Image: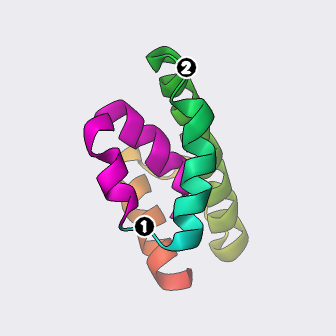
Amino acid sequence: MNVESLCLLGLLRSPDQLESSLKLLTESARAEAEKILSPAKQSAKPELVQRWAKLREREWAELSKEAGDRTGLQLDAIAPAFRLWLASWLVDQHG
């Protein structure tokens, strides 16, 4: 689980429910979330959207690289309709 992604998406989609959602995290993940949230709460919504988009781009690049390293498949060469399914399957199969 990516705590930064959870925090950013929580601030963007459900800021009123974010604090109660953080109680579900482990102590260490909650501490990490608090470090991320302190400065993020001061950011404007467009900044949060941009930060979340960049985070998702990095996650996709890492996942694509991992898929290529493990299976020889390049996710960007797969039909768009199957990319997320294949990526999810690879994570389930290989961690």
In which image quadrant can residue 82 be found? bottom left
In which image quadrant can residue 15 be found? top left
Q: Is residue 5 magenta?
A: yes
Residue at the disc numbered 2: 47
Tag 2, which secondary structure? helix
Spatial CA distance of label 2 from label 1 is 28 Å
Colour setup of the view: rainbow
The three-letter amino acid code for the residue at tag 1 is Ser
Q: Residue at x 56, y 82 (%)?
A: 94
Q: Is residue 50 magenta?
A: no
85 left or right of 92?
left
Residue 74 visible in this rendered orientation of the protein: no
Residue 87 picture location, percent across and down: 47, 63
Number of marks in picture:
2
Decide whether the magenta segment is chiefly helix, strand or loop.
helix
| Vertical comparison of 67 with 84: above or below | below
Residue range of the region highlighted in magenta in the rendering: 1-23
Q: Residue at x 51, y 26 (%)?
A: 48
Residue toward you, 92 or 49? 49
The three-letter amino acid code for the residue at tag 2 is Glu
Residue at the disc numbered 1: 88
